[in-house]
Structure formats: structure tokens, C-alpha cells
Image (cartoon, helix red, strand yellow):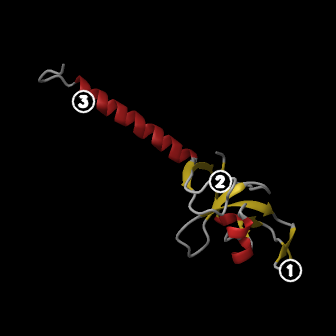
Amino acid sequence: MRRIGDDRNTVRNYVELAIALVIVCAIMISGVRITFVIGPSMLPTLQEYSWHVVVGVQDPEVGDIVTFRLPDEKFSYIKRIVAGPGDTVDHWGTAITLGEDEYYVLGDNRGNSRDSRAFGPITGEIIWGRLIF
């Protein structure tokens, strides 16, 4: 039972809050982010309305699922890299050789995805994360 003047619960609450804030700050500084999938473009690999853990990426590789934001767009995309620098891809019947730091990304649900087939190859500088979970 809590008595008047007993501040042990208040101090404990502040300590728990401080520990939680330190943990959140450490996660944010480390580059770990949480992302939310909206839309069916990555089905069946990623379910619509699912949460995932993303880390920063320096050198993306073919097969990685990455998050990126196109210039002048409000939302980020999450897609799979299917071709990287120096690879040649068939872009609507035209063979394109990707330049240095260019990537071709596609959604796993090819029939329902806005991806490089619509906006072309992306550069590595707009990729901000790689899915780890």
C-alpha cells in the first residue's frame, strides 16, 4: 500500500522511463529502423500491413530487399534488387546496362508492383536501408 510521502514508486517510474529512452536512442543511433509495408507489391515474401526491421546499407547486393525514397516522392518503397552495377536488364524490350551505382529493383508480386519497370533504375544514394527481418 502506498503511503503519503512515499516516493519510491515515482523514482522507479522515472528510472524505467530513463532506461527506455536510452534503449530507444541507442537503437536510433545504430541505424536500425522499423518499416511498415503498405500494398501487395512484395507478396508473398512480405505480407501487406506487416512490420519489418531495416538497417542501413553501404553496398547493396542483388537479392537484397531494400528501402528507398525517390526524389520528390512522399513515401518510401520496399523492393528487391534484381540487378546491380554493370548488369544488363531487359527494360520493356530494350537492353539497358546499369551504370556505376545503379540498381534495378522489382516487387516480388510482379503483376502488382510499381518498380523500376515504371521509374527506371535507381541510384545507390537513395537506398536508405536493407531488410533484415
Q: Dot 1, how many residues are within 10 Å of its Cα: few (below 14), some (14-19), or many (20+)?
A: few
**Residue at the disc numbered 3:** 10
N-term-proximal mark, 2 vs 1: 2
Q: Circles 3 and 2: CB distance less than 8 Å? A: no
Q: Residue 66, image x and y in percent? A: 68, 57
Q: How far apart are marks 3 and 2 (CA)?
A: 42 Å
- Residue at numbered disc 2: 46
Q: Which quadrant would residue 4 be assigned to in this image?
A: top left
In x, y percent, where is residue 9? 25, 26
Residue 31 in picture, x, y percent from top left: 57, 49
Residue at the top extreme, as displayed: 1
Q: How far, Cα to Cα, is label 2 from label 1? A: 29 Å
Decide which of tag 1 and tag 3 comes sooner along the chain: 3
Q: Which label sits on residue 93? A: 1
Query: Which residue is at the front of the view, 122 or 81?
Result: 81
Q: Tell me the quarter of the image containing the C terminus.
A: top right
For numbered disc 1, what is the local secondary structure? loop
